[in-house]
Amino acid sequence: MTNSTKKAAWRGGNGAQTGVNGRPHSITPPMKNQSTAARVLDYLRSRQDLHLKPQHEPGKFHLNSPLRPGSDSDGFVLTISDDEHGVYFDHVTKESGTLYDLADRLGIGRPHPNSKRKYQSLADYAQEHGAPADVFIAAGWKETTYQGRPALAFKTKTGTRYRFLDGQKPHYKSPARYRPCWYGLARAVEITAAGGPLVICNGEASTVTAQYYGLAAVCLTGGERGKIPEHLLNELQEAYSGPVVVAFDCDQAGRTSAARLVEQLQDAGYQARAVDLAGSNGFDLADFCKLHGHQAAEKLHTLKAISQQNTSPATPINELGYYTITDEGYIQYHGPARHTQKGVYYPTPEIVADFWAKLVHKQVIYDDRERTVIYTLYGEKDGKEFTAKIPGEIWFDKNKLATALLPYLPGKPPVVESKKQQHWGPAFSYLGDNKESRALASTGWTPDGKSFVAPAGNIGSGWECALNDNLAEHFKGYGFPRGIGDDQTAKNAVRNLLRLTEIYKPEAVYIAIAHAFLPPLLRWLPEARYLLHIQGSTGYGKTEFAKFFMALYGPLGDQAITYKWSDTPVGFESRAYTLKDVLMLIDDYKPGLFNRGSGDEKGWVRNLQAYTSGSGRGRSQKDGAAGKLRPPRCLLISTGEDDLRFDEESIINRTLTVRLTKPSRNKVDTYHQLVEVTAEFHTIMARYIAWLQQTRPPVKAWHKQFLAQNQHINSHLARNMASNLVGAEAVAQFLYETKLLDAVEINRFKDNHDQAINTAIEDTATTAAQQRYSIVFLEAISEALSYGTVYLGEKDIMRSGYIGWYDDDYIYLTPAAVTAANEWLKKNGREIKISNGRLYDQLHLDGYAAQAETKTYRHGDKVERAICLYRTNVNLHLQI
C-alpha cells in the first residue's frame, strides 16, 4: 500500500495544523455538529495549565492529566484515531479509557450520530446502535437484499420488517397489510422480574440495545406512537400490570407523543411517566444506553419527567394573525403586525370566506385499526342555514376543502381566490365552538376500556356510538337503560332469566346463559369465540328461546333478529364486524337451504371460517386496492331445524350444539309472563358491564385452567367447553359479588351448568362423528344395497350394475360407488359435498379403509381401481 492510498491519519494541533475534515482548530466553543474529538481537543486547548503537546505520531498528544487537579507530570497520553474514536492512558494512576469515556468525565456532550446514514453491514449498524453484532443476530436480525436494496431483516409477530442499509428513503419497509405489533414484549416482561419498570421506546433497534443493557424495553413496530391501538393495549394489559416509563426520542414530536401515551396508559390503570433522555435533537434510547452502558437502568431513574402541560408550546396569536367575523357575518383574516421604519404596520383585513360559518363539532371516531375525524360546519348561505360534515383528510387539504365547500359559496359559479383557501380550516377552527366528542364505530368496549357503547345507550360516559348509516337503524335496539336500575328490579330480572328452565330444556338454558355473558369478555379472551347452535324442530320455540338472550343487550321482539341463514352472506360481514363484544343471532337454518357449490353456500363457508379464525376476508375495492379486513367481532348464536352441515372441520369443530325439546302446552302462560319482563334483562347486562370495569376477572387464567382439566376430549371441543365455562364462571361470580344470588343459588347454578356442558359436549361430539362423510357414505351404500339399487359381486365376479366386489377379508369399491351413494342421498336432500379423494381420506382415518386412495386390483380378466375396505370394520354398515 502506497502512501497515497493509505487512509489519512487523524491530526490535531494549533495554528496551521488541521483537525477533522481539514478544518482549522479553534478555541471557540464547539459548534453543534462538531465531532467528539474536536470538542475534547477544543476543551483541552482552552486549559492553559494542561500544556497540550502534539507528538510526531499523528493523532497522539501528551499533556497534564485533566482528571487530576494540579497535575504537572505530563504523563497523560491521548491517542485519537478518528472523529469519534480514541483512547487515553494516565501513566501516574494507570487509568485508561476511550475517547467517549474521557468526554463523559470532562462533561463534554457528544454529537448525535446520524442513524439514517449508510451502513456497510449488520456489524456496522449494531456498533452505531451501541450493542455487539451478536446481540442483534441473537434477536433474529440478519443481512439480506430486499427489493434490490441491502437491508437487515427481522421478524415480528405480524410479519418480517426490513431496515435498509443504503441510507436512502424509505429507511424501513414492511410487507403489504402489515399490522403494528409489540416488539420484545415477552423478553421485556421477563426483565421486569428483577424489579425495574417496563420501558416503552421508539424503534426495534433501541429495544434490542436497551434489553442488552438490562432495560425492560419494548416498542410498537412502525415508529413512535402517541396512542396504542386497543387490541395491543389489551395484549399489554394481559402481559404486564406494573409501572411504565415512556422514553421516546429527544425532539418535540417525541416529547408530545410520550405525553399523550402516558395519558392513555394512566387511563388504562398504569403508573406511567414520560422521561426526557437529556440528549440532543433525535437522541434515542439506544444512544442513551450507548452512553451509559450497563449503568443505563440506574441512570434512567434519575431522568426528569416530561410535563404533559408543556409538550406543545403555544405561539402567540399575534405572530400568526387572527380571525374575526364582520358585521355582515363574513370571516376575515387579520395578518400579523410588522415593524417598519415608520412604526408598526397592521395589514388590512381580508375576507377569506364569502359566507358565514363556524366549526361546531369535531367527532373523533375510533375503530380497532383506524381513527377518523369528522368536522361539522354550521353556517348560512343566502339567508339559509346549512350543515356540512367534512372528513379530516379533506379538512387538512386546502384544495379538497375548497372543493367540498364550493356548494355552499354564493355565486354561480362561485369565485374563489386560491390564496384564501389556506385560511379556511384554521379560520373555522379558531371561530368555532370546537366541541370535541369521541365515538366508536361499533358497539362494545371503547379503546380506554372506560365505557361500553351501543346505539341505544352506554355504560360509562364520554363516548358516542357512530355506526354506518346503513346499520345504525338496523341496530337501534342494541343498548342499555339510562341507569342500571334498582336492586330489586335486577334481582327479579335474574330470577326470571333462570325461570326459562321451567319452559325449555334446562341444559340448553344454562349453556345459553353462559354463552350470552361471554361477548364482553372477548376483549381479554378473543380466542374464546365459538358458535352456539340451537337445534329444534318446527314449533319448539327455538327462535323465541334465542330472543330471550338477545334481550340482555337490548333488542326485543322482531328487532332481535339480526340476520337469517336465508339472507345473502354478503351482509353478514359488516354486521358481524360492527357488533363488537355483543351477541348476534343468525336464525332459521334448514336442511337443503343451500344448493351444493352455490355462491351462497361458499359465501357462508367463508364467513364462518373468518368467524372461527378471527380474520377478515379483505374484499377488493373498485379501484383495485385491497379492502379493509373486517373480521367478525361478535359472538354468534344460531337456530335451526337441523344441525349445521358445512363440510369444513374448522366450522364444525368451533360449534357447540344444544337441542330443544317441545315445550309443554301448560307452560304457555309462563312463557308470556317472561316475554313481558324481557325488557328488564338488559339491566342485568348493564350491571355486569359495570362489574367487569371494576373487577376485570382473570378470564385467560380460567380458560387455561379449564383446557387443562379437559385434555381427555377432542382439543377443539375442549376449547368450546372452556369458553362456555369461562362465561359461566364470570356470570356466577358477578351474580354472587353483586348479591343478585346467594351462595346456595350460585352453587346450584354452577352444578347444573357443569352437567349441561358435559351433556352438550358429548352430544356435539356424537353429531360431529355422525356428520363424517365416511359414515354417511357407508350408510347410503348399505341402504342402496338393501333396496337392490346397486350390487356387490363375490370375489372376482364383476357384472354390469355392480359397484364393487368382496372376498373373505376386504371389500373393494370402485369410484362408481360414490356416484351411487350421491344418487341415493339426493332423494333425502343431501349429497356428499367433498371430493372423492377427501372421502377416501376420511374412510382411512376412521379405520374403514386400508389406504387413503384407490389402487389397481385385478378381478377376473379385468383390472379396476378401487378403495379397499376392511370387511370386519364395515360389516355393521354394509351387512354383507
Image (cartoon, rainbow, N blue to C red):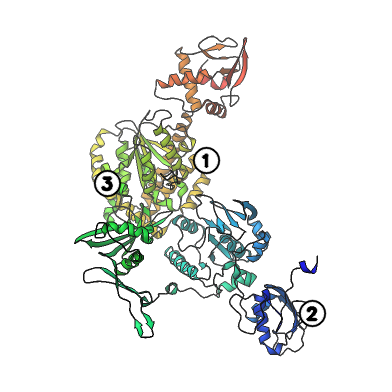
On screen, residue 676 versus residue 91, left or right, reads left
Query: Which residue is the site of mark 1?
Result: 715
Number of marks: 3
What residue appears at the point 51 percent right and 55 percent down from the top-left corner?
Answer: 181
Instruction: For label 1, count other residues whose C-alpha is less than 10 Å away and answer few (under 14), some (14-19) or many (20+).
Output: few
Query: Can you see residue 483?
Result: no
Instruction: For label 2, count other residues whose C-alpha is less than 10 Å away and answer few (under 14), some (14-19) or many (20+).
Output: few
Q: Secondary structure at mark 3?
A: helix
Image: 756 above or below 641? below
Instruction: For label 3, count other residues whose C-alpha is less than 10 Å away and answer few (under 14), some (14-19) or many (20+).
Output: many
Mark identifier at residue 56: 2
Q: Check disc 2 and give the amino acid type.
A: His
Q: Give residue 858's position: percent from left, percent from top.
A: 63, 14
Mark identifier at residue 5: none
Image: 42 above or below 85? below
Q: Between disc 2 and disc 3, whose residue precedes?
A: 2
Q: Are marks 2 and 1 in contact (CB under 8 Å)?
A: no
Q: Secondary structure at mark 2?
A: loop
Mark identifier at residue 678: 3
Q: Secondary structure at mark 1?
A: helix
Of the two numbered discs 2 and 1 in the rendering, the one whose residue sits closer to the viewer: 2
Q: Are marks 2 and 3 in contact (CB under 8 Å)?
A: no
Q: Are marks 3 and 1 in contact (CB under 8 Å)?
A: no
Which image quadrant: the N terminus?
Answer: bottom right
* Frontmost residue, 780 versus 292: 292
Q: Check disc 3 and give the amino acid type.
A: Thr
* Frontmost residue, 84 versus 682: 84
The CA distance from mark 2 to mark 1 is 78 Å
